[in-house]
């Protein structure tokens, strides 16, 4: 700064504008053209594939294992779901899809058979209660 420049905050308000120093910088601009070196340019291409979603149906299989497990279908479906998740973590998408599809099919069968057993049990209980009333001879 100059010795003649005014302070930034002055206590007396004057109508004379403060003097500023003019700063000049010279920049060297390079002309864009071909490559500056004789070596050829190298490029690297990285292909990032989106993560494919493979359903493993592990929650459904666990539910069927704990609650609806006719003929151990829920447990077998759970085993296939775990295999599907392992294949997915290993990067084998086709294997994960195959095991996941098998787990889905087993879960459907376990659910259908369980619902049939529950429906048959309710129907037999109602029919038995109607034909044999309690306390009757």
Image: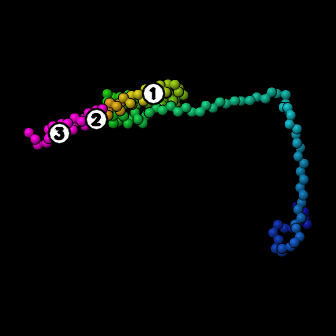
Q: x and y percent of residue 108 in the render?
A: 38, 30
Mark 1 — residue? 101
Residue under numbered circle 2: 119
> Which percent across, then down, holds residue 124?
22, 35
Residue under the image location 30 percent in, 32 percent down: 116
Does the magenta stretch mainly form a helix, a strand or a loop?
helix
Local SS, label 3 = helix
Q: Is residue 64 magenta?
A: no
- Quadrant containing the N terminus in the rendered view: bottom right
Q: Which residues are magenta?
A: 116-137
Quarter of the image where one finds residue 6 = bottom right
Mark 3, residues whose alpha carbon is within 10 Å: few (<14), some, or many (≥20)? few
Return the residue nearer the eye: 54 or 109: 109
Q: Is residue 8 above or below residue 78?
A: below
Identify the residue position indicated by label 3 in the image.
130
Q: Secondary structure at mark 2?
A: helix
The residue located at (20%, 36%) in the rendering is 127
Give residue 99's quadrant in the image: top left
Residue at left offset 49%, top offset 27%: 97
At 65% from the left and 30% from the top, the residue drawn is 47
Residue 55's x, y, as percent?
A: 48, 32
The residue sitting at the left extreme is 137
Q: Residues within 10 Å of mark 2 (few under 14, many from 20)?
A: few
Disc on the earlier residue, 2 or 1? 1
Query: Left or right of 49: which side holds 136?
Result: left
Can residue 83 be seen in this snapshot? no
Depth-wise, is mark 3 or mark 1 nearer the camera?
Answer: 3
Q: Nearer the viewer, residue 94 or 124?
A: 124
């Amino acid at each position: 700064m100059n010795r003649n420049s005014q302070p930034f905050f002055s206590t007396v308000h004057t109508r004379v504008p403060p003097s500023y120093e003019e700063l000049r910088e010279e920049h060297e601009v390079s002309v864009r053209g071909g490559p500056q070196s004789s070596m050829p340019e190298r490029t690297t291409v990285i292909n990032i594939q989106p993560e494919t979603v493979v359903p493993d149906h592990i929650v459904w299989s666990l539910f069927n294992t704990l609650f609806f497990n006719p003929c151990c279908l829920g447990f077998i479906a759970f085993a296939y779901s775990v295999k599907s998740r392992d294949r997915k973590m290993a990067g084998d998408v086709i294997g994960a899809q195959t095991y996941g599809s098998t787990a889905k099919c087993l879960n459907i069968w376990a659910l259908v058979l369980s619902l049939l057993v529950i429906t048959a049990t309710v129907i037999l209980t109602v029919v038995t209660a109607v034909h044999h009333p309690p306390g009757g001879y």
